[in-house]
Image (cartoon, grey):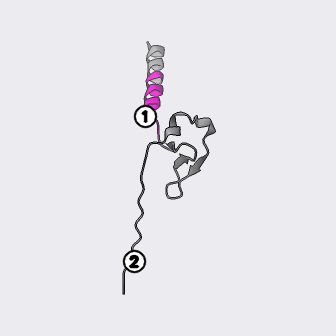
Amino acid sequence: MSNIYQVSVVIITPNPNLMTCPERFCNWVRNSQDPDHYVCLRCDRQKRLNQPDSIWTFIILFAIAFIVVIAIA
């Protein structure tokens, strides 16, 4: 009895279309194994949903705190 194994090889290469593909023209497809992961079919750009953007959160919280401090003073 012989054992048969299937091996998958994924080669990641930089896509030259990445700089020429504006996000508004991307055809986003959802990864079936990870529902928060989307990939552009045109340029392989990736994005994740439900992942907080920490810099914007910091800026907004800082602005709110600044406004509250100014209002109290």
Q: On screen, 26 above or below 56?
A: below
> What secondary structure do most residues of the magenta stretch adopt?
helix
Residue segment shown in magenta = 52-63
Residue 65 falls left or right of residue 29: left
The amino acid on which the numbered mark 1 sits, given as a three-letter code, is Ser
Tell me which label, 2 or 1, sits earlier in the chain: 2
Position of the C terminus, as image quadrant, is top left
Image mark for residue 54: 1
Res. 24 image quadrant: top right
Q: Residues within 10 Å of mark 1 (few under 14, many from 20)?
A: few
The residue pinned by badge 2 equals: 4
The spot of residue 59 in percent (x, y) is: 45, 25
Image mark for residue 43: none
The spot of residue 42 in percent (x, y) is: 58, 44
Q: Nearer the viewer, residue 51 or 39?
A: 39
Contact, mark 2 vs mark 1 (Cβ under 8 Å): no
- Secondary structure of the residue carrying tag 2 is loop
The amino acid on which the numbered mark 2 sits, given as a three-letter code, is Ile
The spot of residue 32 in percent (x, y) is: 54, 58
At x 42%, y 63%, the residue is 8
At x 47%, y 39%, the residue is 52
Q: Does the magenta stretch include residue 57?
A: yes
Label 2, label 1: how many angstroms apart (C-alpha)?
A: 47 Å
Q: Residues within 10 Å of mark 2 (few under 14, many from 20)?
A: few
Q: Does the magenta stretch include residue 6?
A: no
Q: Nearer the viewer, residue 8 or 45?
A: 8
